[in-house]
Image: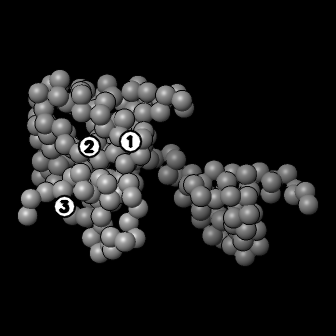
Amino acid sequence: MKHPPRLAELIEALRALPGVGPKSAQRMAFHLLQDGRSGAQTLAHTLEAALASVRRCERCRMFAEQELCAVCASPQRESSLLCVVESPADVVAIEQSGSFRGRYFVLMGHLSPLDGIGPEQLGVRALEAILDEGLVRELILATNPTVEGEATAHFLADLALRRGLTASRIAHGVPIGGEIEYVDGGTLARALAGRQSV
């Protein structure tokens, strides 16, 4: 069945969300137009306001409404530790752990030459400027354990080492509460290779 043009546009726009396929987008569009019109209006206004006021922090590239995000503006954060992550969601996850008191730099992606994503697209010049200030002593690389994430981590580690800084990689392995028999082979291999003395 062919949808009216505006409905088709709405369905296609909803497909831009991660993990939303054609059926899910259609279900959402139908809900918003059938039973959720007031919620749809709120969503539209909120999205418009967020697009107008949310930008990137001028220092770390995290989402912010001011020049600096809350982390960069805080004098309580440890300036000698800089954690590099791929996305704003990674910052949120680390912050929720409550275990890191340093600062961040958000790449907004990872190196992927086939997709045309190189150092320029990841803001590496801005990262180098931060490293050249002389406050950072350790660069913590918290990119994802994918091929692209590992390549990005190696590239950034070279930047740090050329400046005489410590570069460390977050540990990867068996999750707390996980059972070894259910962990995939790649994760087990990484856990064994990264084992520590007890």
Image quarter in which the C terminus is found: bottom left
Image depth: mark 3 or mark 1 in front = 1
Residue 98 locus on image (x, y percent): 21, 64
Question: What kind of residue is marked 1?
Answer: Gly
Query: Mark 2 highlights which residue?
Result: 141
Which element type, helix, strand or loop, lies under badge 1? Answer: helix
In this image, 98 relative to 146: left or right? Answer: left
Question: How many residues crowd mark 1 within 10 Å: few (<14), some (14–19), many (20+)?
Answer: many
Task: Report the mark closest to the observer, 3 or 2.
Answer: 2
Q: Is residue 118 left or right of residue 35?
A: left
* Amino acid on which the number 3 mark rests in the picture: Ser
Which quadrant of the figure has residue 163?
top left
> Real-space Cα distance between discs 1 and 2?
9 Å
- Going by the image, does 139 lie left or right of 124? left
- Which residue is labeled 1 in the image? 149
In this rendering, position of residue 160 left or right of residue 26? left
- CA gap, disc 3 and disc 2: 15 Å
The label shown at residue 87 is none
Question: Can I make out residue 133 in this image?
Answer: no
Q: Nearer the viewer, residue 65 or 94?
A: 94
Identify which residue is drawn at 37% across, 48% down.
Answer: 144
Pick whichever, 127 or 58, lies toward us. 127
Residue named by callout 3: 99
Question: Which residue is painted at 12% across and 48% down in the image?
Answer: 78
